Image: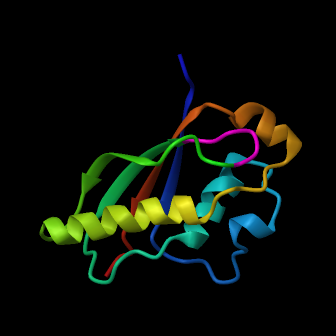
Amino acid sequence: MKRVAKLAIAGVMSAGVVCASAATLNTMDDVGTAIQSCWTPPAGAGDSTVTLSFSFKRDGTLIGPPRPTAAKVAGDDKARKAFIDAAIAAVKNCTPLSLSPELSQGIAGNVFTQQFVSPKQ
């Protein structure tokens, strides 16, 4: 059975965060921060969250597309799609990740979940 790691990502963008492809990542916290730096939640997202499930290869590329596993999105179907698409785009746009040799040994094939939360209005 695969190990599942969880990463919580808030919608608040951190100033000065380096994009994932520019820095070597040493921990899963680094991975979460890197992906957060690529995410821009849609305007007017309200009180919304989406959890994505995804896996990496040792070279930092994705194994298949990220999949939403849970979503609570304010608004209509169009708003829901935009919010989920923004979270998926963040993961895709940040890959391939530059993983340290130590992290790449333990990351391959494991299923990770990451929650994206809209910023407080």
- Which residue occupies the extreme left position in the image? 76
Left or right: where 16 falls relative to 1? right
What residue is at 70 percent from the left and 65 percent from the top?
Answer: 20
Residue 57 among those drawn in magenta: yes
Q: Quadrant of the C terminus?
A: bottom left
What residue is at 34 percent from the left and 55 percent from the top?
Answer: 50
119 lies above or below 117: below
Q: Quadrant of residue 44?
A: bottom left
58 lies above or below 24: above
Q: Position of residue 74 (x, y in %)?
A: 19, 68
Our reading of the magenta stretch's main secondary structure is: loop
Q: Quadrant of residue 56?
A: top right
| Color scheme of the displayed model | rainbow
- Which residue occupies the extreme right position in the image? 101
Q: Position of residue 118 (x, y in %)?
A: 36, 70
Q: Position of residue 42 (x, y in %)?
A: 35, 78
Query: In the rendered structure, which segment of residues is drawn in magenta?
Result: 55-60
- Which residue occupies the extreme top position in the image? 1
- Which residue occupies the extreme front position in the image? 64
Using the image as rendered, state which of residue 53 and residue 57 is in the foreground. 57
What residue is at 51 percent from the left and 43 percent from the top?
Answer: 64
Using the image as rendered, state which of residue 93 and residue 115 is in the foreground. 93
54 lies above or below 118: above
Q: Quadrant of residue 72?
A: bottom left
What residue is at 40 percent from the left and 74 percent from the top?
Answer: 41
Q: Position of residue 100 (x, y in %)?
A: 85, 48
Residue 6 among those drawn in magenta: no
